[in-house]
Amino acid sequence: MFSLESLTTIVHIWLNKTFQPNLALLLEFVIVGVLAITLFAVLGLVLVLMERKVAAWIQIRLGPNRVGPKGMLQSLADTVKLMMKEGLTPDGADKFLFNLAPYIVMISAMMVLAPIGFAKGFQIWDINIGVLYVSAISSVSVIGILMAGWSSNNKYSLLGAMRSGAQMVSYELSVGLSILSIIVLTGSLSLNDIVLSQQNGWWIFKAHIPALISFVIFIIAVTAETNRAPFDLSEAESELTAGFHTEYSGMKFALFFLAEYINIFIVCAIGATLFFGGWMPLHIGSWEGFNHIMDYIPSSIWFFGKTFFLIFLIMWFRWTFPRLRVDQLLNLEWKYLLPISMFNLLLMTLVAIMGWHF
Amino acid sequence: MLKEELTIIIKELLPDAVIEEAGEWLNISLESNEFKQAALQLRNFNQMPFDFLFCLTCVDWKTHFTMVYHLRSKKTNDNIVIKVKLNRETPQIDTVSDIWRTAEFHEREVFDLFGIIFLQHPDLRRLFLTDDWVGYPLRKDYDDPINMIKL
Amino acid sequence: MKTMVEEIGKTVEGDLIINVGPQHPATHGVLHLVITLNGETIKNVEPHLGYIHRSIEKMCESLSYRQFIYSTSRMDYLSAHINNHACAMVVEKALQIEIPARAQVIRVLMDELTRIASHELWWGAMAMDLGAFTPFFHAFRERETINDIMEETCGARLTMNYNVPGGVMADLHPNFVARVKNFLKLYKLKIHEYDELVTGNIIFQNRMKGVGYLSAEDAISYGVTGPAARGSGVSCDVRKHFPYEIYSQLQFDEILETAGDSFARYMVRLREMNESIKIIEQLIDMIPDGDFQAKTKAVLKLPKGEFFQSVETARGELGVYIVSEGGTTPYRIKFRSPGFSNLSALNHMTVGEKLGDLVASMGTLDLVIPDIDR
């Protein structure tokens, strides 16, 4: 049975045999860095194409189908196009901040890849405060967006960045509270522990009603966090042309674009880890035979399958719902989602104490 | 309402007006100095308030201008036409944008294309043409050596 | 270029003046709005027009009475048939030409099909402005069917120059009746999708209810006509008040809503599509035989005088006013376009609301800029 864990063990042993321990460690850093960047790039390409195909499917048309078999190479064509475009910097823009902004957004997106468990034993950094780390670093991208909007010297960008900043900061609360409600059950912030605690079943099934409420709030809140429709008024095409990234073109725009899709991947990965068990196959309590069969499917397939299902869900939202107005959006968060998630946290605590979960 | 009845009612309301019955609707000719007063009276007429100004335009008869106002009373669905003659050297008339708000844009258009000054208009500027355009295109004596006017 | 706002000193420190347009995804056409914002709240909306001013009125003074009709298709291109219809009717009224019954029925059928097509495009574009991209494709699915029907009979999909003084230019294609009946069947199947996808969606309702309020008195004062006025409770359908062609013999309702906000205007247009379907159903089986065009002279000369005719386009009341001196070309033509007056109410409707509400209000006013600029 193919397993990524064995692959990492083999590489680790070989490196330590061939080189000195320090050099081996350094080489491991380099390999992991390259893999992370590759994953970043490949995911970006795949998700862009997936978005276009899903959009087309929902809108009763075909989507890109000229470049490559069934349009598979469309993303490559897009990348080549973006690389060849002229990168304009507007005249009155603050050059240093203007150039720095996309990198901040991208770096914060890449750093969050570290604690996520892609497969059994295939985790870059099993930090014991994994969830807190993810939450904290993903908040840094707000700075990048505000920087982009401000330094563009454009009223539209500024409006878009202000809206975006307000939105992201508000919805982080709901995300945090819904994550916390699962942490209450697991008792540990480490992502590996959370996955292992779902050995006998995923949390969304074990902690029935509160987990379901948490999940719904989580999905709504992360759609708002990543500036996706129906909460995408910071890039509302019909109102502000392109919001905070109006003035960006060429490679810098590509970085924003890519960072948005990676953010979606990351939040769906977190959602899959917390609610659906991450790389843990579907186990039902103590049904040994069933569990054994489920274990045959490699854990990386489980992880990517769940994540892509959640990504599909978020993409589905975009092409179905219209956009909320900015005050309605903030209303939704502060008057509805936040009280419900606080109440849900209490409910979950009650369930955890009384042992009413499976 | 039949034209004859309407003629009687309007004659009662505006005794000084010259009323012609030729054409589809009643044509009322007024002088430019009595126009605003008559417009107010028509608007506030209790029996049939003429509250809907649906067309405001100007015609350039080479010796003078004629302002044409088409009014409708929503209550009784009656239409009347008011015509005001303006002289060619100093074409000016009172604005009716405080009586019918639709006149704001229509009067700007007439100013833009004919050059008629509307006194007390809140914002009399050119509407379609650029601010630095010279001349009034819809006048009959407008000639543009560069662009072709007569097809 | 100074805006009116800056000139008369209405701006306060901290106001942001932004330009929406002339190139902008939400203003359908080249409309330039200069908006004064305080944060997200609109303080003043000032339209700058003229980007597509082609001076049609001056141009028509050099065109003959048979030629000038087709310049109106380019004004409100979404109701091209109805515009041409108005012009043809003015000429017929002046020359007192009696048009045959078959031509009347064909004209009404084409008018109603055009009205449905125009409302479909409005619905799709409005949903897209509010952020839902999918209804656009659903709307165009229906609109393409109508365009195909038009193309078979009239030869063109958008500016079908089909009306002539005296009737219509050519007879209906033999497939016309069958295709229209197919379209009616298809439409009835799909119309409930519109309600489910868009009208019943709570996000749409929140974006449109209470937004862009226009009272009935203001609507009359600003000269607003068409579905925008009917959403405020003003009964102004020219087909009912001053019936032309055979509209007085047809059974259809004038849809009125009293709320006066964007949602009311939206519902009026949606229900008007159903009324147009009713009219088509009443006529499609009973197209009388006969001539499709009355005999008229080749060169038309209108008698001296003034003539006016209004029709109900998809946007409101279009009036054609001709002053004739007895020659072969008009002395003065004035087109009373519905969009021009509807636009003048935009400032009044949106002051005090947010930028997102401006998009919703503009969408429900259904502005077509060439109609405004002429």
Image (cartoon, rainbow, N blue to C red):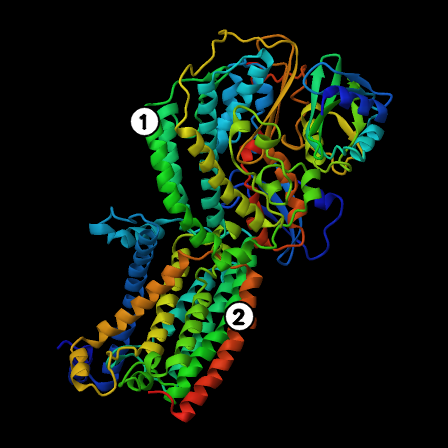
Please state which amino acid type lies under the numbered disc 2.
Glu
From the viewer's perspective, is residue C323 above or below residue A21? above
At a point 66% along the width and 27% down the height, the residue shown is B133
At a point 23% along the width and 80% down the height, the residue shown is A120
Residue B85 drawn at (x, y percent): 78, 19
Q: Is residue A313 visible?
A: yes
Quadrant (top left/top right/bottom left/bottom right) for the N terminus of chain A = bottom left
Q: Are marks 1 and 2 on the same chain?
A: no
Q: Nearer the viewer, residue C268 or C102?
A: C102
Q: Is residue C363 visible?
A: no
Q: Nearer the viewer, residue C165 or A152?
A: C165
Q: Which residue is mark 2?
A: A333
Relative to residue C316, is residue C123 drawn left or right? Answer: left
From the viewer's perspective, is residue A163 above or below residue B86? below
Residue A268 drawn at (x, y percent): 36, 70
From the viewer's perspective, is residue A261 above or below residue C27? below
Question: What SS does tag 2 mark?
Answer: helix
The disc at residue B89 is none
Tag 1 subunit: C
At a point 70% along the width and 17% down the height, the residue shown is B60
Mark 1 and mark 2: Cα distance apart in space: 56 Å
Please state which amino acid type lies under the numbered disc 1.
Asn
Residue B143 drawn at (x, y percent): 64, 16
Q: Which of the 4 quarters of the picture holds residue A151?
A: bottom right
Question: What SS does tag 1 mark?
Answer: loop
Residue C215 drawn at (x, y percent): 68, 46
- Closer mark to the observer between disc 1 and disc 2: 1
Tag 2 subunit: A
Relative to residue A171, is residue B79 drawn left or right? Answer: right
The disc at residue C175 is 1
Relative to residue A171, is residue A183 drawn left or right? Answer: left
Relative to residue C357, is residue A289 drawn left or right? Answer: left
